[in-house]
Amino acid sequence: MIKKALVALSAFTLISTTLSGCAGGSVDGHDELHFSDGWVRVSEFSDHVDGMTGAFATIENHTDHDVTLVGGSAEIAKMVEVHEVVMMDGEMKMQAKDGGILIKAGESVTLEPGGLHVMLMGLKEAILEGDEVTLTLDFDGYDDQTFTWPAKASLSGDEKYEPKK
Amino acid sequence: MTNFTRRGFLAGASASAGALVGASAGALIAGQQVASAAEVAAQTAVLKRSEKFHGSHQNGIELELQTFTNFVSLEIHADTDRSAMQRWMKLLTDDIERLTAGEPILADAQPQLALGPARLTVTVGFGPSLFKKLGLEAQQPESLSELPAFKVDALREEFSGGDVLLHVSADDPIVLSHAVRSLISDSLAFASVRWTQQGFSNAQGVVPSGVRQRNLMGQVDGTDNPQFGTDDFKNLVWIDEGPEWIRGGTILVLRRIAMQLNTWDKLGRTDKEQVIGRRLDNGAPLGQKNETDPLDLNAVDERGLKVIPNFAHVRRASPTNPKERFFRRPFNYEVGTAADGTPDVGLLWTAYQKNPAEQYIPVQKRLDDFDLLSKWTSPIGSSVWGIAHGVKKGNVLADDLF
Ligand code: HEM
Ligand SMILES: [Cu+2]
């Protein structure tokens, strides 16, 4: 089952896992989450104190149970949320994703600009290109994980933030 | 025909303009045929080949020519300081690791263009101007300084100088284009593009492997070079003293040399061969059979005349002492053709060496004094780069410089 679902992943994700290595402890890699290609976006929203920005990665669930990414924390941000991008009043906007991001057993989720992402809000410092940002992701059904990811610009991902009422 | 003078050469020029050598189009593959897995593997072999990034030297130098190349010169922003350089080099290191493996970079705007490795290499260098801007003069090797002016120079700003060089080459033009755009995107926070110079050599599978190719004057170019993997190459090219960041690196002199093909092609074959001192068909030295036969500068013909004339390029360029040698890795450029049919073509001419003052400059001075070839060639761009040593896995490019 796991094999089948993973075949659907792009070659990019699979190959990159070997490049970026896997977070998590187990040696055989068959009962863990694999994280690859993690990064944090630099934009005009993140180059000042109190700004915000997104963090992105590909997460593969190699365990035998569903896992949910529910939130996180970072030294550099007052608040970390899990976001989705939705169409609102004819515009793409982002907002907190109720219930978090579900990663089913044997499947994978790609967090990317314009899609699901982790939002760092209330930045305590500007984030510059080439900086390294440390953040912790919190899961239901899995241990929390801490990463240090590079910060870099990308053209896509400028959706406005629409706080939930 | 051996006692040419410069004037005799022009007067005796033959009227036939030879056909221009253009970049030949690749073979068409029938789109409809259903190929077996083995056939597909064979058809995409050029894409699958990869070059390593990590090592004691940067790649893209002691390496057989790739088919396509782009030299990108960047100028740092006024507020780019040493810590910004460190951040930039971190991004570039990660990018190059991924691109040479044939993968998209992080946050790639067009991951679908990372088709595969296609022997991509990226070589990073630093110009003399960078050290001044960053107050890093203490780290500037003595061997890295601006070149003196030469009489032949017709240099243009838009092809000369710069603070940081990204030299990117690959066997596929789309892979190359994607890599160059990716690297430039990740550089724009720190620098702007001063110029880019694109070039090409023979396609894969067209000439025997090596660093020789046909240049657009029709010559076999790159023959007389130090051999890869030898002590000779190491001793001529790889620096082993001075600041830490350049040990294991080298100095690159890049010259954009325009060719006047319309006047060149007025010469007949024999005249052309005399100008270089080598045969056009296979690149053999005049009087010899094979390309790799040694040059015999003392050989005379039955009339007692030198087989390789005094004005011949290979004679003028030959070392007068063992130090005056370097490694050349030549690419052609072709930018277009004017209304009257004059092509804008030439060489992206490179010399890699420990110290230009002892290696390239004496040879260039000798050619500056007299080299018949310069009647049909003129340097229109020039730059000098300190190429940092290679990157070990887990390290960052030039981490001991910034
Ligand atoms: C458009 C300009 C030039 C053209 C078309 C050209 C062409 C050639 C050709 C066809 C050869 C013989 C094959 C080989 O060994 O590669 C050669 C050799 C050589 N060229 Fe050039 N060249 C140019 C500029 C230069 C310049 C500017 C220099 C140095 C300042 C230079 C230095 C040499 C050297 C050192 C050799 C080898 C000589 C030997 O056999 O000892 N060339 N060149
Ligand atoms: Cu968001």
Image (cartoon, coloured by chain):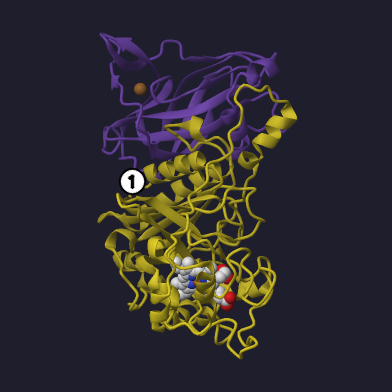
Crowdedness near tag 1: few (<14), some (14–19) or many (≥20) residues, C-alpha within 10 Å: some
Report the quarter where the C terminus of chain B lies: bottom left
Question: What residue is rendered at 54% in x and 47% in y?
Answer: B170
Q: Position of residue B365 (x, y in %)?
A: 42, 82
Q: For the residue marked with disc 1, what is the amino acid?
A: Leu
Q: Cβ of disc 1 within 8 Å of ligand 2? A: no
Q: How many numbered circles are shown?
A: 1
Q: Color used for chain A?
A: purple
Res B381 seen here: yes
Q: Position of residue B163 (x, y in %)?
A: 35, 61
- Taking the view exactly as shown, the residue that stands out farthest to the bottom is B304
Q: Quadrant of residue A63?
A: top right
Q: Color used for chain B?
A: yellow
A109 up-or-down from A38: above or below: above
Quarter of the displayed picture in which ligand 2 can be seen: top left
* Between B278 and B242, the one nearer to me in the picture: B278
Q: Quadrant of residue A142?
A: top right
Q: Secondary structure at mark 1?
A: loop
Chain containing mark 1: B
Res A26 seen here: no
Q: Position of residue A126 (x, y in %)?
A: 30, 40
* Between B158 and B127, the one nearer to me in the picture: B158
Q: Position of residue B179 (x, y in %)?
A: 47, 43
B395 up-or-down from A44: above or below: below
Question: What residue is rendered at 52% in x and 42% in y?
Answer: B25
* Between B193 and B171, the one nearer to me in the picture: B171
The residue singled out by tag 1 in the image is: B188
A1 up-or-down from B260: above or below: above
Question: What residue is rendered at 60% in x and 53% in y?
Answer: B54
